[in-house]
Amino acid sequence: DTEVTQTPKHLVMGMTNKKSLKCEQHMGHRAMYWYKQKAKKPPELMFVYSYEKLSINESVPSRFSPECPNSSLLNLHLHALQPEDSALYLCASSPRTGSYEQYFGPGTRLTVT
Amino acid sequence: GQNIDQPTEMTATEGAIVQINCTYQTSGFNGLFWYQQHAGEAPTFLSYNVLDGLEEKGRFSSFLSRSKGYSYLLLKELQMKDSASYLCAVSVVYNFNKFYFGSGTKLNVKP
């Protein structure tokens, strides 16, 4: 199983809503990542979890709150988002942090109205 | 900081060979990855170079010169389905080996 799954595929939310994005992998990977990707731009790293601990926060606004309940799951909690937060949110995993290829999930297309 | 450059867009003909270049200036270089991304989809891993030289994987090959800060992805026998963006990503040895992505090269394959 070399798959990273993400739910939902699409999400439309208002600026006052609270929602969560979910990511799951069963490859035994111990590093998981959240990226944000705007149209025609490369993925931008948001957070890195290593062995279920937050290792990197790329100065992401607090309206994005990551959570890693266990080694297979990664959540991104969203609250009071802005329209400019509309983007494709990608989850990725790798065996560990290090020079390993990252496997990406299909992404969640988020629209903030 | 990290500086990774790729051409914005390229066009090639079905059946031909195309080379996509990537130049980088980074500190703590630890490896270079190539990803393919079709519009609206997730990036998929293509190849990885950490030492100088050529890595071949079927129709795809990737080359690295660490001294020159240069890599290329070579696609042979182009197919229409190869139309996609190709992202070069550099891994750096400090700070948990973050990936820094180039802006991507959009490849258009014409019949």
Image: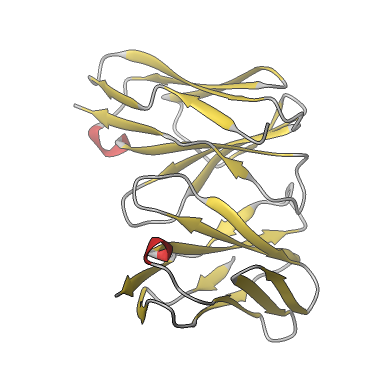
Q: Position of residue B6 (x, y in %)?
A: 47, 74
Residue A2 at x, y = what percent? 66, 36
How many labels, in total?
0
Question: Residue placed farthest to the right in the image?
Answer: B51
Q: Quadrant of residue B80?
A: bottom left
**Colour mapping used in the image:** secondary structure
Q: Quadrant of the C terminus of chain A?
A: top left
Side (left or right) of A70 relative to B38: right
The image shows residue A56, relative to residue B30, as above or below, that is above
Question: In this view of the protein, which residue sits in the foreground, B9 or B26?
Answer: B9
Identify the residue shown where x is 44% and y is 56%: A42
Residue furthest toward the left? A113
**Residue situated furthest bottom in the rendering:** B68
Q: Is residue A8 left or right of residue A5?
A: left
Residue B97: x and y, percent?
72, 51
Q: Quadrant of the N terminus of chain A?
A: top right
Residue pictured at 75% horizontal, 85% vertical = B67
- Asked if residue B55 is positioned above or below residue A22 in the image, the reply reads below
Residue B68: horizontal and vertical position, in percent?
68, 86
Q: Is residue A37 above or below residue B110?
A: above
The residue lying at 44 percent from left, 82 percent from top is: B16
Please determine whether, in this image, residue B1 is positioned above or below residue B42.
Answer: below
Q: Say which quarter of the image contains residue A29.
A: top right
The one of A53 and B56 positioned closer to us in this rendering: B56
